[in-house]
Image (cartoon, rainbow, N blue to C red):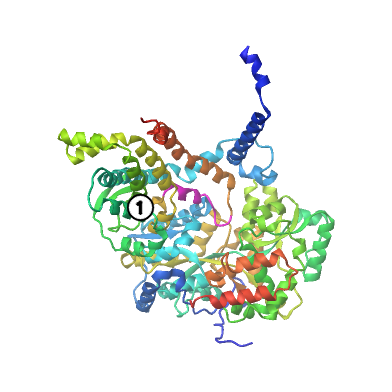
Amino acid sequence: MAVLARPGRIRPSRIVLHAFLLSMVAVWIFPLFWAVYNSLRPVSDTIQNGYLSWPTGGLSLINYQTVWTQAELPYYYLNTLVIAVPAVTLTLLLASLVAFACTQFSWRFNLTTLMIFTAGNLLPPQVIIVPLYRIYLSTPLPMLGELDVGKFGFPFFTDNTLLYDQYIGIMLIHIVFQTGFATFVLSNYMKTISKEITESAIVDGAHVLRIWWRIVLPLCRPALAAMATLLFTFIYNDFFWALLLMKTGDKRPITSALNNLQGEFFVNNNLIAAGAMLVAIPPILVYIFLQKQFIAGLTLGSSKG
Amino acid sequence: MTRSRDPRGEKIVLPGTTIELPLDLDLTRRDVLKIAGYGSLAAFLAACGGGTATTTTSVTAKGGSMSLGSYLSDAVPKKGLQDVVDAFTKANGGTKVKVNTVDHGTYQNQINSYLQGTPEDVFTWFSGHRMRFFADKGLAAPIDDVWNEVKGNFTEGFANSVKGNDGHVYAIPTSYYPWAIFYRKDVFQQHSYNIPTNWDDFKKLAEQMKKDGLTPIAFADKDGWPAMGTFDILNLRMNGYDFHTELCVGKQKWTDSRVANVFKKWSEITPYYSPAFAGLTWQEAAKQLLQKKAGMYLLGLFVSEQFVASGNPDDLAQLDFFPFPDLGTNYDSEKALDAPIDVFMMAKKSPTLSADSGQAKAFLEFMSKGSTQITFWKASPGAIPTAKDADQSQYPALTKKAAQIVSGAKRITQFFDRDSRPDFSGPNSMQGFLLSYLANPKQDTSSLQGKMQSFWDSLPPE
């Protein structure tokens, strides 16, 4: 029988390969496992016995509970969501418009435009922090009330008549800096869409915007999903812009909530490990939800005749 | 010794004593490059910073509202501040206080842009060079009028610690903590060790601890700053307060043979340090002390936080400290030590300050009361109240002793990174130099000292 014959067919190279793979998995999983393990132990346990020890007081979820309430994680999740969701959506809309115009139509400066957007992607954001800070401090915005969620308020536009220290300010700067990269990726993808499709749409009497919305965008779904995952991760991880352009602790994104768990001198690493675990969940969720599209995006077009 | 400028002769008189201690530094500083592009605006603001109008009516106001920017982000001090704010609201006719808490690290990184943007009316900060810097830049508002009403509650030394270079008062000191050598009473009892009072006894004790299988001196310098504490105390005790403070501000040379002597002296105790200390954080070194693996540890009073977190009240009860041993120099009698002071200040650029100034000043006045500081201290006992009328009877033994050791000191410094300019105390400068010294303490330090001096010389004028 084939099943019985199989063990005999295992070659040494295969054993080596699996040993290698298993050890790589261990190397990758170990830090994560260690963080999870210690996040389940109270800090007094690790101070008394060290991090490389069996738990004496048992494992508990007390650190997670403390993080959830002490660092007010739900609010900070909301802060990030309020910035990330509109920023990702708007970036993709704007970038797809540029990419659409530059790839589906022949006009004099279409390549130049594309190059400018790509070049903008190469500009290090740090270069413009000082002028940007000044601009934000002197840009007036209307105050249009706010939406109160618990002790946090989410103002429409602004709550201090300025762009500085506002969700919308952080959102805008993310859109500005991510559009270049998104345009670059989306235009490369759109180049693979055959011209015949858009041409026949024109023949059928479709308006330019209708072609973009009804034909090109649906075809780009895998690329859009992949970009959305990436952009969400970028924006979710951002610490820099909020550090510079926001002063209110309660408005800052989830990444800063972790810092709230540190004292001036004393750091409860077990608590921070628990916080890091919780903070890592949303990007993983986004990836899982968009995974199907993401993989399709990687392989789509590879098997076209 | 050549001096381009005389020290201001700032003095501290400690609560319950008549001892006057000169405090802190004479600083004229322009940290232009530190804030790069903001420099011109800061200079403009500084030019606009006028004197304070003294009014005959009360400077404070009741009711209304004010805002407060706080770096007290850790759960314990955060609660302490909330308790204080609640008490203030109650005592001041229902003044609404909007607190903006930003985590400690971010707050410090952000302070430059924060104070130039739309800061809160009142903000938490540190005394020393760090306070004077923002006063010089015109980003802090002078509070002489508040100070005149509360100064009776502070010793002269605290008074000097909150004075800017222009002679105006810019802050209310609210708490401080000393650096000393910590040990476990039970470990000393078990081996019948005696508290060393001079350098030789200290070294002998270290030698004995080594024989007894202990790490004699816990030490950790992964974060760079802890080593500065040892440099401070050795330099203070060997070369005196004046030399140390002048060295911090560049009025003495790092190539001085007196600095070489400090490194030489230091190398006598480095063999007793924790192994692999360059990779340890202070918490890990404190753990060695807690677990009775190490005998002594030179650190700030905050070392007790690790003992509190261990969850075993007996650990905390065993924690004690003694002052740094005498080195047999003329400066032993100064009993100088690091005791950083935390303060509350008023932000000049706060958009609401013109409306809330009365409430903000009322808050600062409230913060200077002993009863307020005790309220904060009860929730967050890591540092000691500064007010004369703070009720010391409630202090536990460790805090009492800490207050005592500071009042026994005739000279007090703020810690290297608060006394010197920030670009000289960072990882690329002093912290890095000390780490490279500690990598090989027996080295001839002349080339290292040369590097330190040329780094100082390369810094832009402040």
Q: In this rendering, does residue B335 appear at all? A: no
Q: Is residue A259 magenta?
A: yes
Location of the C terminus of chain A (image quadrant): top left
Q: In this rendering, does residue A227 appear at all? A: yes
Residue position for label 1:
A118
Q: Nearer the viewer, residue A43 or B409?
A: A43
Q: Residue at x 32, y 42 (%)?
A: A89
Question: Which region shows up in magenta?
Answer: A253-265
Considering every residue shown, the one lying at the far top of the view is A1
Is A101 positioned to the left or the right of B239 in the image? left
The amino acid type of the residue labelled 1 equals Thr
Q: Where residue A116 sits in the image (x, y, percent)?
A: 32, 55
Q: Residue at x 31, y 68 (%)?
A: B354
Label 1, secondary structure: give it: helix
Location of the N terminus of chain A (image quadrant): top right
Is B34 positioned to the left or the right of B185 in the image? left
